[in-house]
Structures are given as C-alpha cells and as structure tokens.
Image (tube, grey):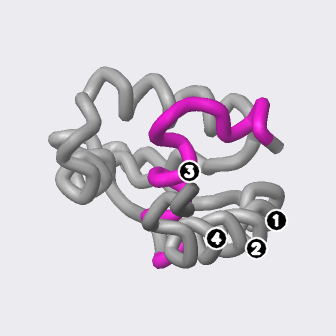
Amino acid sequence: MLSVVDGRWKGTILWRLTSGPMRTSELRRSIPEMTERMLIRHLQELVRDGILIRHQQNSQPPCVRYSISKYGSTLVPVLETICAWGRTHMQPPRR
C-alpha cells in the first residue's frame, strides 16, 4: 500500500476524490500547497498503478476528470483509518 501511495500528496489526492470525480483544475485549487507539476506527476502515477481512472472528453478546451477506480476504492477504508489516526494525534505526545 505504501509503495502505491508514497509521496506527500497522493493520499491527499485520493482523499479529495472520495467525494466524486474532479477536473485537474478543481484538484489543483483544492490543494493549493501542491504545485501543478507535482499534481500532474502524481495523477499520472496513480492512473498507471490502476488507482485512478482518467476520463478525457474530446471538447475544446479538453476536459479531463479523474475518479477512483474500483481497485482504488479498496484503499478508501485504509485512508479513513489513517485520517482518523491523524485527527486523534494532531498534537505530538508529551515526553
């Protein structure tokens, strides 16, 4: 699982797509800390690994949407658990 969602932003991209398909520009706006170059690279890797599906409409300008594949949706419970752990442990433990 970690080899598929390695990197700082892949988990965030997947989490954003759990609410439904999004255009590249929508994803970019929803994660302002991430560069467009990094977004494109991670999207390509997630598509290559079968986690996301890339939908392209033949229109002017081209419209590309990304959604989580059936295979990728098996990662959603794992992401939910990781996010719950993060919310519980936002503050580091005192020593």
Which label sits on residue 11?
3
Lower sequence index among marks 4 and 2: 2
Residue at (46% x, 40% y) in the render: 9
Query: Magenta segment range?
Result: 2-19
Q: Using a 10 Å C-alpha cutoff, classify the residue at mark 3 as few (fewer than 14 neighbours), some (14 to 19) or many (20 or more).
A: some
Q: Nearer the viewer, residue 95 or 88?
A: 95
Residue denoted by label 2: 77
Marks 4 and 3, how far apart at CA: 14 Å
Tell me if label 1 and label 2 are in contact, CB under 8 Å.
yes
Q: Nearer the viewer, residue 79 or 47?
A: 79
Residue denoted by label 1: 74
Residue 45: image location, x then y, percent: 61, 28
Using the rendered view, name the quadrant where residue 36 is placed.
top left
Lower sequence index among marks 3 and 2: 3
Is residue 8 on the magenta stretch?
yes
Lower sequence index among marks 4 and 1: 1
Q: Secondary structure at mark 2?
A: helix
